[in-house]
Amino acid sequence: MERIWCRFLLAAALLLSATISASADDSAVIDRWYSALLVADRTELSELLSEEVHMKLDDVGVVQDKQEFLASIDEWQGAVAGAAIRHRIEKSKKGETTVLACYDFPENDTLMRETFTVVGGRITASTQTAVAQDCSAY
């Protein structure tokens, strides 16, 4: 009976370790995402996105694929000039990470809730929803 408990505990520890490792990896992907987004690094953003990614912008009712998102980077580059992006992970579970992000633009700021699905170190889905027109709740 003791051997069964030892095996069970070992299996549980390995599963927990794998889950923690996956969450840490997802966090690193999210950090890379915001760093690349801030400087409009098309190459890095492309590497972080899976080929089948769906980027959903709830507030404007738009869903973009990878090519559509990357095509919008030139316009984004102008908008993000002089800005800062602060983010913190609210929760991360089973490959889905929810982030609270404050976009501090030179003329205004906005608070967003963004959810990312990460598989194999790449973003396969993203949903972005506005929370507030300023970052006072950040």
Image: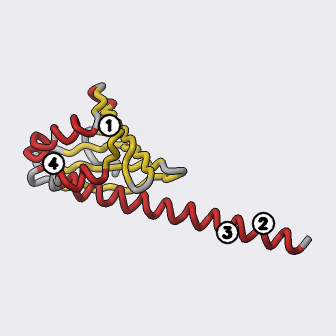
Tell which circle, 3 or 4, labels the residue nearer the N-terminal end: 3
Q: Which residue is painted at 72% across and 71% down in the image?
A: 10
Q: How far apart are marks 3 and 2 (CA)?
A: 9 Å
Q: Distance between the residues labelled 1 and 2?
A: 40 Å
Residue 78, position in %: x, y? 7, 45
The residue labelled by disc 4 is: 105
Q: Distance between the residues labelled 1 and 4?
A: 21 Å
Mark 1: few, some, or many residues within 10 Å (few <14, many ≥20)? many
Q: From where the camera sits, is residue 129 visible?
A: no
Residue farthest to the top, as pictured = 61
Q: In front: mark 3 or mark 4?
A: 3
The residue labelled by disc 1 is: 55
Q: What residue type is labelled 2?
A: Phe
Tell which circle, 3 or 2, labels the residue nearer the N-terminal end: 2
Say the numbered circle drawn on residue 8. 2
Mark 3: few, some, or many residues within 10 Å (few <14, many ≥20)? few
Say the numbered circle drawn on residue 13. 3
Tell which circle, 1 or 2, labels the residue nearer the N-terminal end: 2
Helix, strand or loop for disc 1: strand
Say the numbered circle drawn on residue 35. none
Residue 76, position in %: x, y? 14, 43
Q: Distance between the residues labelled 1 and 3?
A: 35 Å
Q: Are marks 1 and 4 in contact (CB under 8 Å)?
A: no
